[in-house]
Image (tube, grey):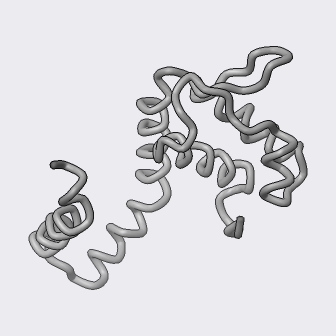
Amino acid sequence: MDFKENPAIYIQIAEYVCEQILLKKWKLGEKIISIRDLAVNMEVNPNTVQRAYDFLQQRAIIAQRRGVGFFVEEDAMERILLFRREQFMENELPVFMRNIFLLQIDLKEIKTLYEQFVKDTFKNKSS
């Protein structure tokens, strides 16, 4: 995985885990990859993955079963959406809003582009 400068690596790993769940590659209620295996796959220190897993446990996205491993919580999807929305609102939206203002882009144009994006990207998924 290619890590960005920000946010912290453990947050980027947590986002990766969330993405796997949202993409349904890691199913609700099922066991996920171990700390050691994910650390090897991502070429990071296991302590960094442990920190990411601790972060996700605090948000009740994953849970540890002692001696067995980590599992995706049954309501993880809702919690991930809340977490990702929070991250988006804090980190990405302010940059987006600033650019709209500085470039004097009309919100109607943004709405039209958004609607076209949804239509083009998800047209087969809603049927």
- Residue drawn at the location 75% of the way across and 16% of the way down: 65
The picture places residue 3, in percent across and down from the top left corner, at: 71, 66
The quadrant holding residue 119 is bottom left
Position of 40 with respect to 85 (left or right) is right
The picture places residue 1, in percent across and down from the top left corner, at: 71, 65
- Residue drawn at the location 85% of the way across and 60% of the way down: 43
The picture places residue 8, in percent across and down from the top left corner, at: 71, 55
- Residue drawn at the location 27% of the way across and 76% of the way down: 101
Position of 101 with respect to 49 (left or right) is left
Residue in front for this viewpoint, 36 or 104: 36
Name of the residue lying farthest toward the bottom: 103
The picture places residue 122, in percent across and down from the top left corner, at: 24, 59
Residue 115 in view, yes or no:
yes
Residue 59 in view, yes or no:
no
**Figure label count:** 0
- Residue drawn at the location 42% of the way across and 39% of the way down: 81
The quadrant holding residue 29 is top right
Name of the residue lying farthest toward the top: 66
Residue in front for this viewpoint, 81 or 32: 32
